[in-house]
Amino acid sequence: MRILLTADPELPVPPKLYGGIERIVDLLVTELVNRGHTIGLVAHPESTSKASQFFPWWGKQSQNKLDALKNTKVLWSAVQKFQPDILHSFSRIFYLLPLLNSSLPKIMSYQRNPSLRTTSWGTKLARGSLTFTGCSDYICGIGQHAGGVWHTIHNCVELDKYTFQPTVKSDAPLVFLSRVESIKGAHQAIAAARQAKKPLIIAGNQVNSEEGKNYWEQEIAPYLGKDGIEYIGSVNDEQKNELLGQAAAMIVPIQWDEPFGIVFAEALACGTPVISCPRGALPEIVRQGIDGYLVNNLEEAVSAIANISKINRERCRQRVEQCFSADVVVSKYEHLYHSLIFSNTLVLAEN
């Protein structure tokens, strides 16, 4: 198949540091090329992903109107030059505008909450040539309110980057790994660890907004260096693997509806149980009492910490192997491509 993929223009594929969606796109490019497909990529000019053919965006900002017009032209031109069998967008639906009424099969993938207004008009203009995917049932459930055909294809991790650790030390710490902001629940992790009398390592970027700085100064900084609470800053992939592998559990008690959260699958890949909250896609990732615990308050979080030794770390790893590995997820996309191209071929033949 000839598959044209797009990513947002802000970050290269793969990203140099943070960039969850860009990592997914790079993984797709790599795996699909390895499977013998011809892959085109439209992305940030500094992208180094191993696509067969690369088309750089002209506009650098997704929300800039002039840049959006530039990138619409870039994508139109890329389609004319690459002649794909299918177009798969992880960028903005607006860029598809000149292509929507064409018969070319198109997939619009959402890793965040979809806009009901734009997905609704996209569905109407495409007249059956546009299909949607969401990174969780939660995201698809939102999108379905606007109509269209939706498929859940979860995010994934590259298993060979995460070392399964079947056991940890009896005094192993808890780990909080995420952006250090209110919606990720770092303050709740601190409160639970202190009450449970367990050490906690906090890793992740601080947020530089005024709200983020106030949160850090009021909710995080006063507790550092006391009761085993430690902050180590952001970590790269190798450090993340080591940090998660040595942890008794990863505790990220989210305070918002997380679309997916790759870090939860990364923890499970190391065999590390997850303690979080039953919001967004978390119930799709963590099976209660099997891969960790989903808690509703501080009391339940402390109880989960006390019972973390009951979780079988091997089953955590198996969860990722069976549901969230790159091989499984890329195969789901590949199957969707085949089915849409086949359906389009039948329609063209009938006409």
Image (cartoon, helix red, strand yellow):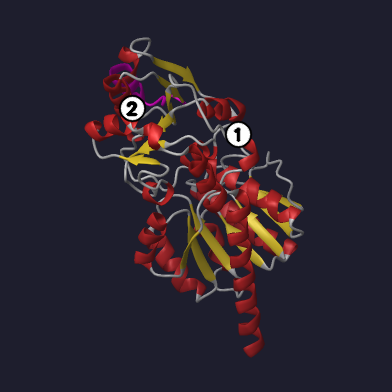
Asked if disc 2 and disc 1 are in contact, CB closer than 8 Å, the reply is: no
Vertical arrangement, residue 138 with respect to residue 162, above or below: below
Q: Quadrant of residue 239?
A: top right
Picture coordinates of residue 342, whole percent (x, y): 64, 76
Q: Say whether residue 162 is magenta.
A: no
Vertical arrangement, residue 30 with respect to residue 211, above or below: below
Q: How many marks?
A: 2
User: Depth-wise, is mark 2 or mark 1 nearer the camera?
Assistant: 1
Type of amino acid at the residue the image marks with label 2? Ala
Residue at x-position 63% and y-position 53%: 327
* In-image side of 7 versus 189 (left or right): right
Span shown in magenta? 204-219
Type of amino acid at the residue the image marks with label 1? Thr
Picture quarter with the C terminus: bottom right
Vertical arrangement, residue 7 with respect to residue 314, above or below: below
Picture coordinates of residue 166, whole percent (x, y): 54, 33
Residue 77 in sight: no
Picture quarter with the N terminus: bottom right
Q: Which residue is the extreme one toward the top?
A: 225
Q: Which element type, helix, strand or loop, lies under badge 1?
A: loop
Residue at the spot of label 1: 163
Residue at the spot of label 2: 189
Q: Say whether residue 214 is magenta.
A: yes
Picture coordinates of residue 303, whole percent (x, y): 27, 32
Picture coordinates of residue 30, whole percent (x, y): 70, 49
Nearer to the camera, 49 or 224: 224
Q: Main secondary structure of the magenta part?
A: helix
Residue at x-position 41% and y-position 60%: 140
Residue at x-position 66% and y-position 80%: 345
Q: Quadrant of residue 117?
A: bottom left
